[in-house]
Image: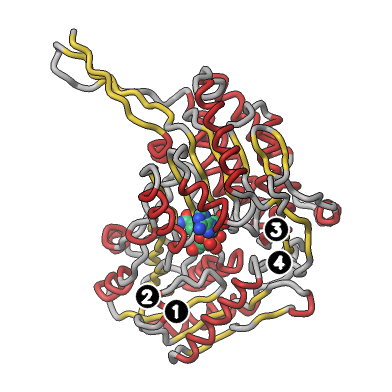
Amino acid sequence: MLNQDKINELRQQVIPPQQLFINGQCQPASSGATIDIISPIDGQLITTAADAGVEDVDQAVAAARNVFDQGSWSKAAPAERKRVMHKIADLIQQHALELAVLGVRDNGTEIGMAIKAEPGSASATFRFYAESVDKVYGDIAPTDPSVLGLIHREPVGVVAAIVPWNFPLMIAAWKIAPAIAMGNSVVLKPSETASLSLLKLAEICSEAGLPDGVLNVITGQGAVSGEALGLHNDVDVIVFTGSGTIGRKLLEYSARSNLKRVYLELGGKSPNIVFADAEDLKKAARVSAMGIFRDSGQVCVAGSRLLVQQSIKDEFIDHLQAVAEKLVVGDPLELSNEVGAINNARQLKQNLGFVDTAISEGARLVTGGTQILKESGGYFMSPTIFGDVTPNMTLAREEVFGPVLGVMSFEDEAEAIHMANDTNYGLAAAVWTGNLSRAHRMIRAVKAGVVHVNTYGGPDVTVPLGGVKQSGNGVDKSLHALDKYTDFKTAWIQL
Ligand code: NAD
């Protein structure tokens, strides 16, 4: 049970300057440089973090490579890797509230959501992949009897994981857990604006018995240390979650260096499609609203394009507006608030810019569209709905990554499919209908990594998450994610 007094106590804790975590040790950047960590709750300085340079990245990659080659983790018995990973999951659970509050202090997600999505799913993810360690087998190929074809899975080596500011713990766990389960070493690069909970995670992993060097954390500017990781000739794989702009750079870095594999989880403009035959329009509106407004829309799978059948459009927008206007936005560390802060001032400004553009392009502002709670010094925005959005408007085409919903209407199923797929992205989608056949037709027709039916959000670690089209390649979560962290090696034996 979440306790406001305990949260208040944790939020008062003074956080010392944060250092890099390399080879099991905390150390400053070799240049001594730091970046400021600003609270999105009040715009005040929380602490500083080391601003890693190329030399620090070299050290972290060398530590990861050395321990990999030396084999204390990469060649450890599966039972040992499994034991340590369960211990990590236990410690995440033990420190759940501390991790969640730390995370909220620099990323701004509402605490009720953060506790479930951050330590909650991170510990579940470590457990899931702990169990994979001694349950994923190699294969024997169905060859001619005169030969034996064996297929081994081997760890790839050094994995660089670069993650965004939203749900940092959950997304980092989706990458670290399968990587280390398979025996790899990791250099983790958190976002400039959300690193506190990840440095704590590194400590937890060390306490659980993960050998030094298997997980290293490099904080600081992406344009410096992220680029250095991308160009590094001793990094074997990059796993990235973030924007398409940086995703493109990573592909370029790979081409300019050692052709390291690059797996990208990028943004979306996900269609949430409501048919007139949906069973409970009020419920659909409530869930759809949270599908865009939770974490202030800073969710890659946010249902930011609402496609609603013309005959129920007005009624549905009324329901949505009622939900949006009741949502309590405010200090994310107050349990009574339902929506927290925008992560940083630049993102808030960008969101408000999208509002101006939508208005100038002729969309109808139904509700919201403004910065609120300015007196707090923090970055808050009212849940925003635009009606009369048309497919060519910027709001229908570009990812906002904020609490801004654009509503469009369609006449029939064919038009809904056409509109849903009329995007460069393909991350998530949802269909609301009481007609089972229609639901299955839509699942097949909509191009997206996940299609929800009569709900929005919630898939757990057992199922893959990945994008198609410009939303990325490869998947996080599920046993399928293990393919990113293993090489297949064939043994062909003449009998
Ligand atoms: P971002 O792309 O700006 O930053 C992501 C990471 O890249 C950060 O750690 C940053 O420091 C680093 N980086 C910045 N410049 C770099 C460079 N030149 N080289 C290497 N690394 C660099 O993304 P963000 O603003 O932190 O996050 C928001 C974006 O992430 C949105 O587009 C959102 O849709 C996407 N996202 C996608 C998923 C998914 O699973 N598909 C999940 C969450 C967020």
For marks 1 and 3, give the one nearer the viewer: 3
* Lower sequence index among marks 1 and 3: 3
Disc 4 marks which amino acid? Pro
Whether residue 445 sits left or right of residue 165 in the image: it is left
Whether residue 88 sits left or right of residue 353 in the image: it is right
The residue under label 1 is 395
* Lower sequence index among marks 1 and 4: 4
* Lower sequence index among marks 2 and 3: 3
Q: Nearer the viewer, residue 215 or 116?
A: 215
Q: Which mark is residue 276?
A: 2
Q: Quick one: quadrant of the C terminus?
A: top left
Give the image location of residue 419, x and y in percent.
31, 74
State how far apart marks 1 and 4 are (Cα).
25 Å
Disc 2 marks which amino acid? Ala
Badges 1 and 4: C-beta atoms under 8 Å apart?
no
Disc 3 marks which amino acid? Ile
Q: Which mark is residue 35?
A: 3
Residue at image position (59%, 65%) is 294
Instruction: State the SS at label 4.
Output: loop
Whether residue 356 sits left or right of residue 56 in the image: it is left
The residue under label 4 is 40
State how far apart marks 1 and 2 are (Cα).
24 Å
Q: Residues within 10 Å of mark 2 (few under 14, many from 20)?
A: some
